[in-house]
Amino acid sequence: MRREIPIHQPRDAAYVERVRASFALQPAMALIGAELAVVEPGYTEIHLPYRDAITQQHGFIHGGVVGMIADSAAGYAANTLTPADTSVLTVEYKLNLLAPAEGERLIARGEVIRPGRTLIITKAEVFAIREEKWTLCAVMQQTIMTMHARQERTD
Amino acid sequence: MRREIPIHQPRDAAYVERVRASFALQPAMALIGAELAVVEPGYTEIHLPYRDAITQQHGFIHGGVVGMIADSAAGYAANTLTPADTSVLTVEYKLNLLAPAEGERLIARGEVIRPGRTLIITKAEVFAIREEKWTLCAVMQQTIMTMHARQERTD
Amino acid sequence: MRREIPIHQPRDAAYVERVRASFALQPAMALIGAELAVVEPGYTEIHLPYRDAITQQHGFIHGGVVGMIADSAAGYAANTLTPADTSVLTVEYKLNLLAPAEGERLIARGEVIRPGRTLIITKAEVFAIREEKWTLCAVMQQTIMTMHARQERTD
Amino acid sequence: MRREIPIHQPRDAAYVERVRASFALQPAMALIGAELAVVEPGYTEIHLPYRDAITQQHGFIHGGVVGMIADSAAGYAANTLTPADTSVLTVEYKLNLLAPAEGERLIARGEVIRPGRTLIITKAEVFAIREEKWTLCAVMQQTIMTMHARQERTD
C-alpha cells in the first residue's frame, strides 16, 4: 500500500489543528463513526470501523457512506493547504464504486492533485480491510472551492 | 416544482413492494432518518427531515448525506424498472453541490434517463425546503448496473 | 423535443455577438464541422453534420467528438450569462454516452442549471438525428468558471 | 515522470495488434493528428502534436480534444485486457481540466484501475509538454464496457 511522499507546502502552520477542529464540528462524521486518522500537507485519511448501522441491504457498508468518507478525506486534504482564514466546500465529485465495502474497517485516503488559488482538484481512494487484506473499493475525483473568511459554527 | 409524467413501464408488477422491502433493509437509511416517500415507474423520492446529527460544521445538512439520498433515490428509480429477480448496484455517480442544504427537510428525486438491459442511466435532483421555499441544492448523474438473481439480506 | 422557456437574464446586451465571436475563433470547432446554431440566454445549440472524418471504428460519430460539442454547447450557454468583459473555461465535466451517435447530424443542447458569480453549473444533452428520428445519445453535467478581463486571441 | 510497472495480464496474446488495428480504423483520431504511441497490458499512451487546427480561442489545444485523447487512451488501456473477440465502449467519463493545454505536444496516459468482466474502470492523465517541461493539464476517471463478438468496421 505504497504512498508517494507528500510534496505540498502548507500555508498555515496550524493547519493540523484547524482541520481537526473543523472535523470535530461535523456531527454527521460522528454519526457514522468516522475518525480523522491522518492529517498531512495535501493528504488526510479517514478511518471508519464497521458497524451494522451503516450497512446496506447486502450487509456491506453503504455506498453512500463510502462516498461520505471519500468526499471528506479529499476535502480535508484540500483544507490542509488553504490559508488560515479559510474553509472549503465541495463543488462536485465523481465516485466509482469498484467492489463491495466489506471488512472490519474502511480507510479513505484523500490527496490533492492540484492546489489552485480558488479551486483545488483532489482525489480519494477507499480501501476495505478484511483480516488485513486491503481491497480498493472506491475511487473519487473531486473539485473543492476555497472560501475566504468563512465562519465555522461555534457550538 | 413541475415534473414530467413518467413514461417508463415496469417489468415486475410487484415493483413497489420489492423496492420498498429493499429500502427497509438498509440500516444506513434509517440511521440518517431517510424515508422512501414516492415509488413510481422509473422514479422515486427520498425525504429527509433535518436533524442535528446529520449536519456539517456550518450547521447545514452534510454534503455526504445529500449524496447518500441522491444516490439512493436514483438507484431505486432504476430498481423500479428491473425484473423481479434482480437487485441493482451503483457503478458510479457524479454529484454537483449547488447550494447549502439548509431547511426543514430535503427531497431527493431520482429518475431514469435511459433503462438498458445491463446498465441504467439515471439522474437525481435534491431540493432543500425551508418554509415551503424549494432550493435546488444538488444535481447528480449516475450509472446503475442490474444484478440478476442477487440475494438480499434476510435478517 | 419540448424545451422549457429560458428564464435566465443576460447581463451583457451584446451576449449573442460576444459568444458567436468566441466560437468563430475556435479552429477545433471548424475542424469537426460544428456550427453554433442557437444562442439564447443560458442556452445554446451546436449542430454537427455527419462526416466520415469524425467517425470511430464502427462508423458512428466518435464519442470524443460528442464530448467536444456537449462541452462547448454547455460552456457557451454559461458564457451567455457572464458580463461583457469575461470569458469562461471548463473546470470539469462528466459525460454519459447512452447510444451510438448514428445519424445525419448531431444536436448538442447546452443549458445553465445554476449561474453563480464564479462558478456556473450546466448540463448538455446530445441527440443523434436519423431520418428525423431523435435519439438521446449523451448527457453531460459540467462546471464552468468565469474569467474576468480574459483576452481572446485576435488573429 | 515516474510510472508504476504494469501488473495486468493480457488474455489475448495478440492484444497489441488488435488494439492498433482498432485505433487505425478511427478517422477522428487521424483528423486531430493523434498517434497511439505505447500499448502495454492495461496501459496506453496517445501522443498529439500541436497544430493550429485543434486549438480554441486562446490558442491552446481545445479542451474537447484533450478529452478525446484522454477518453481514447483509457479506453484502449481497457481494450488491451479484454479477450480476442471483443471490443470496448465508453459508458461514461469525468474529466477535470487543470491547466491550459499549451505546448509542442500532448501525451495522454490511460491506465486500468480495475478490470472487471463486464465493466473496466480506468483513469487517464494528460500532460502538455513545452520545451520538455511536463505540465499535468487533465485527469480523467472512466467506465468502460466490454462488448463480446462486436464487429469492427472493415473499410
Image (cartoon, coloured by chain):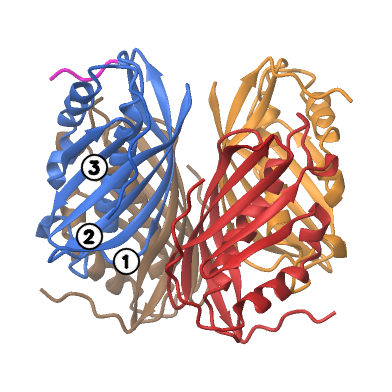
Chain colours: A red, B orange, C brown, D blue
The disc at residue D99 is 1
What label sits on residue D45 in the rendered view? 3
Secondary element at tag 2 = strand
Which residue is drawn at the image coordinates 76% and 59% (left, top)?
A: A29
Nearer the observer, A142 or C84: A142
Residue D7, by quadrant, is top left
Residue C12, percent across and down?
A: 39, 80
Q: Amino acid at mark 2?
A: Ala
Residue ID at (29%, 57%): D63
**Which residue is the site of mark 2?**
D128
Q: Can residue B1 be seen at all in this image of the molecule?
A: no
| Residue type beneath disc 1 | Ala
Q: Where's the C terminus of chain D, which quadrant?
A: top left
Q: On what subunit does the disc labeled 2 rest?
A: D
Instruction: Please state the horizontal and vertical placement of residue B115, each as a whole percent of the image.
Output: 56, 28
Amino acid, disc 3: Glu
Residue nearest the viewer, comparing D141 with B139 = D141
User: Who comes first in sequence, dot 2 or dot 3?
Assistant: 3
Q: Which chain is home to disc 1? A: D
Residue A89's x, y, as percent?
Answer: 60, 69
Q: Is residue D142 magenta?
A: no
For residue D152: magenta? Answer: yes
Q: Earlier in the sequence, mark 3 or mark 1?
A: 3
Q: Tell me the distance, in whole angstroms, between the alpha carbons under discs 1 and 2.
A: 9 Å
Secondary structure mostly seen in the magenta stretch: loop
* Tag 1 and tag 2 share a subunit: yes
